[in-house]
Image (cartoon, helix red, strand yellow):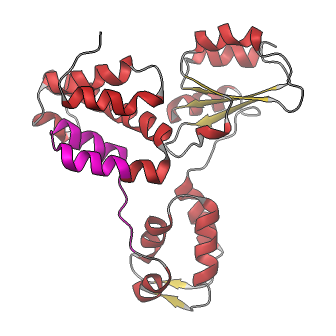
Amino acid sequence: MIQIRKHSRDIDFNIYDYVIEDSDKFLSLLPFLTPKVEGDWHVIIIEPKLAFIRMCLDTEIIPEYLDLVITVEQSLLDQLYLERPNLVEKEKSNWDRYLDMLASFSSILANKTMYEIYRRCGPREDNLRAALDTLSQYPVITMREINKHFAPVTRVYAKQVVQAFLRKHYSSAWKMLGILEADIGSTVAFYAMRKSIRSVFQAKCKYLRNEETTEYIVESVDVYTIILLYWLFESATSPEQLYPILLMFERRQIPC
């Protein structure tokens, strides 16, 4: 079975037997994935090229005992949906699913409380549903009710961690990394940070060509610093190398 999903930072990689970024490596591995004694193989491929996705969909290369999930950016997902509307199902974001829950929520939400519930409970659907069930006892929900049931939280995003390292604020960067890992896990943190530094690198290229960019950090961080962090992430062969490559970045070391 093949599933196409939008790539997001909250994917749980722990449920998969293999997490693969290089489609050629997957093709090399495929002959060795013979049927299990019990259950199926669960494999996820991160953002492969469109040609590879089409090959998987148009041929019988994927055996029935292999549960293959392919993640793609929204633009590719839209393209595949147009090509194959009966095969690819658009996946709602966590925020969209939260808004769907609120559509049938009977209580009145005071100003800013809708976002605050989401921020404190996180993006998981089960946590949000439980929170709304708890708050449904109140006809009107204000910050008072939210503070009564849910402690304030400090959320950190991969982009913030990357920017802290780029600005050489290492003490706060390592602290934020710990918060990020506790929230989404080390593996997802690696992929989210790599995606962020890729965005910064591309923005720096635009900035040097005098093109517009919304990544304002490129104005204050030099080219070498951005390229070094980008290179270290691109050179990494697995998420387990997150700490080593960040230590190398802090020490300004170049991989052999």
Q: Quadrant of the C terminus?
A: top left
What stretch of residues is rendered in magenta? 152-178
151 drawn magenta: no
The residue depicted at 32 percent of the width and 27 percent of the height is 245
**Dominant SS in magenta:** helix
Q: Where is residue 154 in the image (x, y as percent from the top left)?
A: 35, 63
Q: Is residue 121 above or below residue 193?
A: below
Above or below, comparing residue 236 to residue 174 in the picture: above
Rendered image quadrant of residue 226: top left
The answer to which of 194 and 255 lies nearer the viewer is 255
Q: Which of 32 and 117 is in front in this view?
A: 32
Q: Where is residue 252 in the image (x, y as percent from the top left)?
A: 17, 24
Whether residue 198 is visible: no
Query: Most extreme residue toward the right, as rendered?
Result: 37
Q: In this view, does 161 lie to the left or right of 206?
A: right
Q: Quadrant of residue 136?
A: bottom right
Find residue 164 and report its horizontal and vertical position in percent. 22, 44
- In the picture, the quarter occupied by the N terminus is top right
Residue 43 position in % (x across, y down)? 68, 27
The answer to whether any part of residue 52 appears in the image is yes
Look at the picture and state if 109 lies above or below 88. below
Residue at (49, 37) in percent of width and height: 187
